[in-house]
């Protein structure tokens, strides 16, 4: 509804910067026709305190959202709130003053936030002689030469007379054309800078939409949760305005007002985010790279308390350096921010660091991991951050894959990982698969190939050791195998490794467990035949299974041979020892226990006498079966009855 980017050009936000009383607000009023000073105090004092907003239409028809920031040193945090999320800047320098302290600080902040393009407006040229304009322009060019912005267009203008405004608009249009595309973040988030309530409308929040799109009826979350507030995970957008006009969609880069339902005015505050489909959780920790300004008043120790400006929030945190004891002016390092309250930071986000007292800008940072563990000085930590910072994408994907082992990670989840947003995640994963660095298991899970190869080797070693220890029973149960190679856990990677080894014929998997592929079968020849006869005799007894001595004698075996075969059958899980001298064939026992369990489920409990009568057996066998169920954790004795135990889900 009138807010779509023109001719496919994406929406951009322009932020002003500059020293107090250099004419930023006057210039914006001349360019847009809108007065961005909105507070009574601002009108009375003639300075900007809060952020002001307007819309600027360029000669080619493209519209820019304009954020007018305060220039007074006491309101630098508000300046940072306006500067974060902008695409290009307009640095305002008065010709009668030239470069001043806040001019330098604002330009340093712009550089730390990695804002790519901009224009310098040399204002108040109607108040000075032409030679003063030239001196001021030279002063600005010297300042720009100290930064990445050397050679930026410097346009002399007057907000009062209108002189130079057409040239300034043309320069802004040229700069806008140079703004690179934003990373294709799948996340949609808006940094809240104002919250108010209107009669008959309800709660309204405004801010810059950093990425994604928002539409009326979208369900969003407000994050992080306020310290004394409730979870706001299902807030509905009733309506959207872009520069005072109703809109059916808001695009990343635009100034947006959202009318929210399901939330009260007092529950939302500046510094929070409106997020659709959150993919990163608020955190107390973030791994970052930090850069201290050359003008910083002094070095930081290994642990320093700092102010962190991010989005529209000002946070307090401890900065813990990764690999050094001090960080001097002009130096860079890796570190960890430990916030005093939860922050919502995404990989790639830029931060401004300011001293706690006196409050001054000392440097900046960039987030690489919004969900790290707390750690101190560790070379591995530094190496990990170096990979996350510089890539390439397939190195980051391999790192994430290795860290996900042995759980594995869904292919789509890895491709869309926040750590890969600034790259082509799908291409990175394809590169890993093609290079043999990743392996795809059942269910679409990806595993780190090197780690999976190590696990396969461990499985083979465990299987060979069992075969060497007990040729009669070379099988490892899954429980034994997990204890041997997986710390007793059900690792998805273990299932993947077993499937690969089984396909290759390196292991054999059956109802008895897992054995080395070259291990002999447990029982062969005459032993196998005798064991089957013994098993048949025991099975024929049903619930009244014969004792080992009786069964062995019945098939004509010597006691020693019968005991050896019975032991082999037990190891193969063909029979189960229930008491000292009572063995049940596994299939018989499973059937009996199933009948008892079904009876308890129907009646709620069962007594020994009831089991005896139901199975048509003696008290001895009924008691043995119930005590076995007790020992296996299947039943619980309550008085003379048994009840089923509640199993954990």
Image: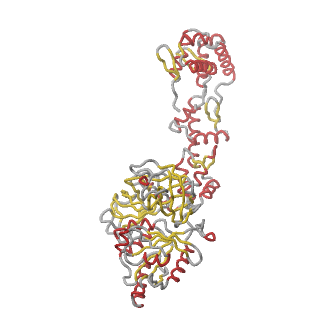
- On the image, the x and y values in percent for residue 176 come to 55, 74
Q: Is residue 93 or residue 217 the one in the foreground?
A: 217
* Quadrant (top left, top right, bottom left, bottom right) of the N terminus: bottom right
Q: Residue placed at 57% from the left, 54% from the top?
A: 217
Q: Is residue 444 left or right of residue 245?
A: right
Q: Is residue 549 or residue 108 the one in the foreground?
A: 108
- On the image, the x and y values in percent for residue 554 come to 65, 10
Q: Is residue 357 left or right of residue 4?
A: left
Q: Residue furthest left?
A: 358
Q: Picture quarter containing residue 102?
A: bottom left
Q: Residue furthest top?
A: 618
Q: Relative to residue 315, is residue 166 depicted above or below?
A: below
Q: Relative to residue 297, is residue 526 depicted above or below?
A: above
- On the image, the x and y values in percent for residue 322 come to 40, 57
Q: Count the marks: how many?
A: 0
Residue 384 visible in the displayed image: no
Q: Residue placed at 55% from the left, 66% from the top?
A: 245
Tell me, what colour scheme is on the image? secondary structure
Q: Residue furthest front?
A: 200
Q: Is residue 211 left or right of residue 351?
A: right
Q: Picture quarter containing residue 300?
A: bottom left
Q: Residue placed at 36% from the left, 78% from the top?
A: 100
- On the image, the x and y values in percent for residue 330 come to 38, 69
């Amino acid at each position: 509804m009138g807010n779509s980017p023109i001719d496919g050009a994406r929406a951009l936000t322009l932020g002003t910067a500059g020293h107090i009383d250099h004419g930023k607000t006057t210039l914006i009023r001349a360019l847009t026709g809108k007065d961005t000073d909105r507070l009574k105090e601002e009108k009375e004092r003639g300075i900007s305190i809060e952020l002001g907003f307007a819309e600027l239409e360029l000669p080619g028809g493209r519209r820019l959202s304009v954020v007018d920031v305060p220039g007074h040193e006491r309101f630098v945090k508000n300046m940072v709130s306006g500067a974060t999320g902008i695409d290009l800047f307009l640095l305002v320098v008065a010709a009668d003053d030239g470069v001043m302290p806040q001019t330098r600080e604002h330009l340093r902040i712009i550089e730390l936030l990695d804002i790519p393009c901009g224009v310098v407006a040399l204002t108040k040229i109607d108040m000075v002689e032409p030679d003063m304009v030239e001196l001021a322009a030279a002063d600005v060019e010297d300042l720009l030469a100290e930064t990445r912005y050397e050679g930026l267009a410097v346009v002399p203008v007057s907000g009062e007379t209108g002189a130079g405004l057409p040239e300034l608009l043309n320069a802004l249009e040229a700069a806008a054309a140079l703004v690179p595309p934003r990373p294709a973040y799948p996340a949609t988030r808006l940094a809240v800078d104002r919250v108010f309530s209107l009669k008959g409308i309800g709660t309204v929040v405004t801010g810059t939409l950093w990425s994604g799109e928002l539409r009326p009826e979208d369900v969003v979350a407000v994050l992080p949760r306020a310290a004394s507030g409730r979870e706001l995970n299902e807030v509905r957008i009733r309506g959207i305005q872009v520069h005072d006009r109703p809109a059916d969609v808001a695009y990343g880069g635009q100034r947006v007002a959202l009318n929210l339902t399901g939330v009260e005015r007092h529950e939302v505050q500046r510094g929070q985010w409106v997020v659709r489909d959150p993919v990163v959780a608020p955190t107390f920790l973030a791994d970052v790279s930090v850069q201290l300004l050359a003008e910083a008043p002094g070095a930081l120790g290994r642990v320093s308390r700092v102010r962190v400006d991010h989005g529209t929030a000002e946070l307090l945190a401890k900065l813990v350096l990764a690999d050094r004891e001090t960080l001097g002016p002009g130096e860079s390092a890796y570190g960890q921010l430990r916030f005093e309250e939860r922050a919502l930071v995404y990989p790639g986000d830029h931060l401004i660091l300011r001293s706690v007292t006196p409050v001054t800008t000392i440097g900046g940072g960039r987030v690489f991991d919004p969900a790290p563990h707390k750690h101190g000085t560790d070379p591995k930590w530094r190496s990990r951050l170096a990979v996350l910072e510089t890539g390439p994408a397939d190195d980051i994907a391999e790192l994430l894959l290795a860290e996900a082992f042995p759980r594995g990670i869904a292919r789509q989840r890895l491709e869309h990982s926040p750590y890969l947003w600034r790259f082509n995640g799908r291409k990175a994963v394809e590169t890993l698969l093609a290079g043999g660095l990743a392996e795809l298991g059942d269910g679409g899970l990806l595993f780190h190939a090197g780690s999976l190869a190590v696990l396969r080797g461990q499985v083979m070693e465990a299987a060979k050791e069992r075969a060497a220890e007990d040729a009669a029973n070379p099988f490892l149960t899954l429980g034994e195998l997990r204890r041997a190679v997986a710390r007793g856990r059900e690792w998805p990677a273990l299932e993947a490794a077993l499937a690969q080894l089984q396909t290759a014929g390196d292991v054999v998997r059956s109802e008895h467990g897992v054995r080395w592929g070259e291990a002999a079968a447990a029982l062969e020849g005459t032993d196998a035949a005798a064991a089957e006869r013994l098993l048949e005799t025991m099975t024929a007894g049903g619930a009244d299974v014969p004792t080992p001595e009786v069964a062995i004698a019945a098939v004509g075996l010597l006691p020693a041979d019968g005991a050896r075969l019975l032991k082999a059958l037990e190891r193969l899980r063909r029979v189960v020892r229930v008491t000292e001298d009572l063995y049940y064939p596994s299939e018989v026992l499973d059937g009996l226990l199933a009948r008892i369990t079904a009876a308890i489920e129907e009646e709620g409990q069962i007594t020994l006498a009831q089991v005896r009568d139901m199975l048509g057996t003696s008290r001895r066998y009924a008691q043995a079966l119930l005590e076995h169920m007790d020992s296996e954790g299947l039943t619980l004795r309550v008085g003379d009855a048994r009840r089923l135990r509640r199993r954990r889900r």
